[in-house]
Amino acid sequence: MSFHLEQASLTHSDGNRALENISLTAAHGERIALIGPSGAGKTSLLRLLATSLSPSSGAVSVLNHAPAQIDVNALKNLRSRIGMVHQAPPLPPRQRVITAVLAGRLGRWPLWKSLLSLLYPLDIIGAHQQLARMGIADRLYDRCDKLSGGQLQRVGVARVLYQQPDLILADEPVSAVDPTLADQVLVELLVETRSRQVTLIASLHAVDLALKHFPRIVGLRAGHIIFDLPAQQITAALLRDLYATEGTLPTQDNRPLMLP
Amino acid sequence: MNPRTPPRDPALLPRLSLTVLALAVLWPMLLLAEFNPAALFDAKNLKVMRHFLATFLPPDFSPDFLQLIATATLETLAIATAGIALAMCLGVPLALIATRSLSLSQIAMRADSRRWQGSDALRWAGRGVLMLLRGIPEIVWALLLVRALGLGPAAGVLALAITYSGMLGKVYAEILESGDARPTLALLESGSGRLAALGYGLLPGVLRELTSYTVYRWECAVRASIIMGFVGAGGLGQLMELSMRMLNGGEVVTIFITFLLMVMLADGISHVLRKMT
């Protein structure tokens, strides 16, 4: 099992209830899209799985470990197997792209290797490979503050691909990438899941991208799971209901959505 | 109330009372410190000053004296550099201990929060040690160490190392904490160790600040080692003390010029390093 949430609820310290009684399970190699209006709890759900938050009640198990019950070293080890693509990539502006990508393996590299690689990058080929998949191999030695928002987001994806995690969590991984490239980025993430039999769960703002690329769709609204269905069974009525508060269905470039 | 007139500035009263308070506190302090500008212009004092200043010109540029200055300058620079290097060896680990952003407690799961109370205690202990180290001025250490180690640069180096490790450690920790913590947090959340997360997440953002503060401290150490020279810790200070005692103004001015050149050197180094990082 890749992850398992059992009746998990999350209340933020300000009293805001982000998630309520969420039960969700994924097998190895599954590809899941999380959709729903903003504020539905998509990011909170991903952060639960990333072990950066623990549930207020209920149980979380990730890669067959309960993060709240294992010791520091086991938690560190578990975290090195979880890759998180952040919506706003947390990269230091003055860091070079290659260093930012190589940082993906810090959880596995011994300290001496990590520190040495700060002086001279120790896996230029590896970093170059992942950047090439994102179409930005030419930015290898540029500093992060020279990149556009979309390019930076792709560096974040390249870092996670380089990390080779067993569970990939992606929080709006293509929100800043322009539509033609968004497909390429998602395809590369999906290729990764197939070639290494790892799980991918991605929150997506654009419904059409979710339906096009992901076999399993989870709809989230106000902290509750509204539906959890194969993509073929998603109907216009379900989506209208999910996004009732927003009025329109969010898609890339606001293109009209074709549904079977 | 007339709706046309805007309300009075609510900050007026606090600001006024703060000013009055500051004056009320400062005035007795100036009296206590025997601050009396008139003493500068007293006829007798003016005569002494004028006499001493007159001996300042011309500066002494005789080859023998320049030779002396060169050796003393090298010694001063060596004291300051060795002192700062030793201070870094002690200050950097203490800064890491005292920095909150590197604390695992920030990202620990709630269930094991009790485990991290120990690390809080360690952090406060680190702060305490830093405070002790910088609490006693380097000149006091120099006076003590000159007794223990005898006259010469070794006392100056050790004195600098003790006090400056406290200063460096404190400010390093503050700079590290002022940096953007999100990159570090993201790395820790993907299983990175703390030192590696520091190197990849925090350092890129704060390296410039750390460098320029260190160079500035080196500049201060140069000045401090001159003062310590007065109590026998070698270098330019010792030379200057001799010149002053013999009221040789020409030599004193030459030494002043050397000071100025060294500060300019420090400024140049800082500029170059900030450009590089």
Image (tube, coloured by chain):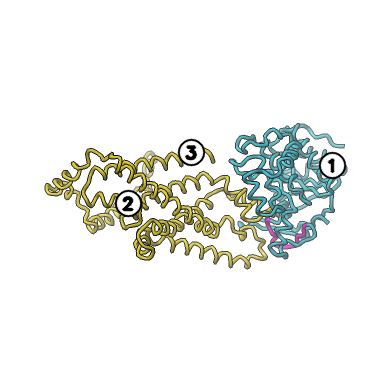
Left or right: residue B227 compared with residue A33: left
Q: Name the residue under label 2.
A: B237
| Hue used for the chain lettered A | cyan
Residue at figure coordinates x 71%, y 41% from the top left? A124
Q: Name the residue under label 3.
A: B272
Q: Are marks 1 and 2 on the same chain?
A: no
Outermost left residue = B43
Q: Which of marks 1 and 3 is in front?
A: 3
Name the residue beneath numbered marker 1: A235
Q: Three-letter amino acid code at disc 1?
A: Thr
Task: Give neighbour class at mark 1: few <14, some 14-19, many 20+ (Cα, 10 Å).
Answer: few
Residue in the foreground of this view, choosing between B141 and B108: B141
Q: What residue do we see at 78% from left, 44% from top?
A: A241
Please report whichever mark, 3 or 2, sits nearer to the chain's N-terminal start: 2
Q: The yellow chain is which one?
A: B
Gap between marks 3 and 2, in whole Å?
Answer: 28 Å
Image quadrant holding the N terminus of chain A, namely bottom right
Q: Which chain carries label 1?
A: A
Q: Residue A125 at what x, y percent from top left?
A: 73, 40
